[in-house]
Image (cartoon, rainbow, N blue to C red):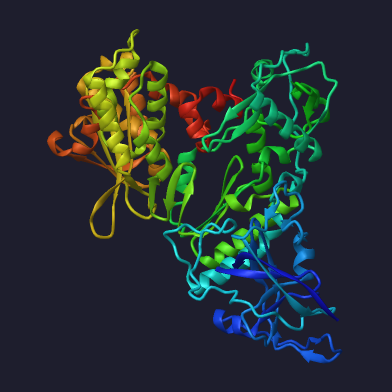
Amino acid sequence: MCSTGKILKVKGQLENYPIKYSLDSGASKSVISLRSVKKLKIKVLSSNIQIKIADNSIKKVIGETEPMLVSIGSRSCFLKFLIMDLDDNEVLLGLDWFLKTGAMISPIEKKLKFPGETLFLELNDDYFEEHSGDYEREELFISEVIDEEDIIDDDWPLEDNSPKINIYPEHQLSDKDYKLFRKSLSYVSDLFAYSINDLKSCNKGKHKIKLIQTEPIRLQPYRKSYAEREQIKQEIPEMLENGIIEPSTSPWASPVLIIPKKDGTKRFCVDYRKLNSITITENWPLPRIEDILDRLSGSIYFTTLDLKAGYWQIEMDEDSKEYTAFTTPDGHYQFMRMPFGLKNAPAQFSKLMHQIFGVRVYVEIYLDDIIIHSKTAEDHVEHIRIAASLLRNANLKIKPSKCTWFARKTKILGHIVSGDSIEMEDEKVEAVKKRQPPKNIKQLQSFLGLCNYYRKFIKNYAEIAAPMFKLLKTDKFVWSEPEQKSFEALKKALISKPILRQPNFSRKFILHTDASSYAIGAVLTQVDENGNEYVVSYNSRLLKNAEIHYGITEKECLSVVWAIKKYRVYLYGTNFDVITDHSALKWLMNITDPTARLARWAIYLQAYEFKIIHRIGISNGNADALSRPVLLIEILNQIEKTQSEDISPKYLDVYEDDNLMFYLINGKI
């Protein structure tokens, strides 16, 4: 059959290469030209397929490809191509691709639509090329392709940062690793969610709210600007359509907030602070970020998976839905899925993820972040397969644009991590560069909160920040030269992108300790294969009121006992060195009539195997710098007591700049 029509072309990727695909839903199979196969060095598989073309003649294809990764916009899938001897570099997506992706094309509107997409891909001049001419189409194959420019760019640049596949820019995959990477994607491609419509319901549990009292709380809606009302009008229908919310007759009502995000967009949020105040706390410990980072040590390959709207994949318990009700200018609604801002949402989500994944040495979970790490590429593929199977069994979906694959260095929990080092995330360094001096106590607390999160990177942290810590103790905020110098010095320390080394548990640890009149400090180090000592972690704290009155000998003993307790997870069961500038520890281990406190310390230290190395103070600069002169304030101890690790690093910017936003999202109020 011969017909006249238009061939629409769309930019995309075939494997790692940029390409312009021809789209034709009238062709039963997708086809790639022999020229393209040779240019791409694609493996040709034998095939017995024959096709019938427009003149009813039978033509045998040259062969077929193995499944290849086809990416267009936010959609990716694996697809086999028939190989034909054509006159150009044609790569045509046929009906098999349309059926696999659910894509629909409108030549008149020049739009490409995928299921669940609310924004259609415009076929504009920059993105699509349109060609008119005569071509023949039959059931299986377009028998002739019109004359047009080469579809494949001549230089074939490798693009690692497609919207779909995020490979860390500093890392280039070898041919072997790339094949394994492709194999790993085949295990997870069915888990990709491109919109809310693609989400399912987790089958491992529902979120239940238990209250101290059952008398309904009904709050009046906050006043909204015209722009905010318009956003609410846009958000509500989409959430209704996708089963996130439903109309409600609940006597409960919480107000809606529209809060700006750092990318300039707005977030729809419900203020559940009153509801949270009468909610019974569910205790489930979030994993410690330090422990997660330690367990990544020695791994070479990293893949991070991010759940698509993770909370919205958890159903609300039927009896709890009414508590989540909120009112808008256009109606009263309640959540069918777990919303942001509920008091126990982070704990419930963490508990659920632990239930799904259990304890696996190659998977780390922090809320909806899934970190898969392995020592070999072959192991990594298998680990991804197992993780994908567990997600599939739980009906959970991931957001492909937020995932990274087969990275040697990747962003994890606010850090850049490789097999042997940890750095601050680049975005956080840039944020520090742009910070202006605080103008009030709240801004100062915010800045010190950010610095405290990364304090393990900063040598002399306590000394540098001392004037600002001191200011927090005063009743009046007066920013003067000492505070400004402290602020600039701390910024400089963070901007320098300090690097810590991952702990290597096959090497001996060295613990440097010291004490001053007001504080104690410690540095944990190791020595590499070249004999160079490197830092694993810095730490220090303010002495408590009673401890300030200890004699110097007791303070030195305290610094050692505290440091060993602090780094117990590294030191227990190993043989390590303790380097201090005082002979107090030797005295403690040999004392014949100790006080109760000293006896407790001595008994505690008996569980550890270490060698004491005495070093004069001037040469023991590592720990000295952390404690002399030093003036730490309650903020460090308070953060430790309230488990600062509960602050999700993905919300760190919110924590810095908008306390209300942080608390709303994490349900802390």
Residue 28 spot, x, y in % from top left: 81, 74
Q: Is residue 227 above or below residue 353?
A: above
Q: Quadrant of the N terminus?
A: bottom right
- Camera-side residue: 317 or 478? 478
Farthest-out residue, top: 475
Q: Percent position (x, y) of residue 499?
A: 33, 47
Foreground of the two, 656 or 627: 656
The x, y position of residue 513, in whole percent, is 26, 34
Q: Judge left or right: residue 207 versus residue 648.
A: right
Which quarter of the rendered picture does the C terminus lie within? top right
Q: Is residue 464 above or below residue 178?
A: above
The residue positioned 72% from the left and 58% from the top of the image is 112
Q: Is residue 291 left or right of residue 106?
A: left
Expressed as whole percent of the image width and height from the top left, the position of residue 543 reads 31, 20
Q: Nearer the viewer, residue 245 or 11?
A: 11
| Residue depicted at 57% across the width and 66% down the height | 181
Q: Residue at x 41, y 31 (%)?
A: 450
Image height check: is 131 above or below 106? Answer: below
Compared with 289, 227 (above or below) is above
Seen from the viewer's position, the closer of residues 69 and 210 is 69
The answer, for residue 376, to whether it is visible in the render is yes
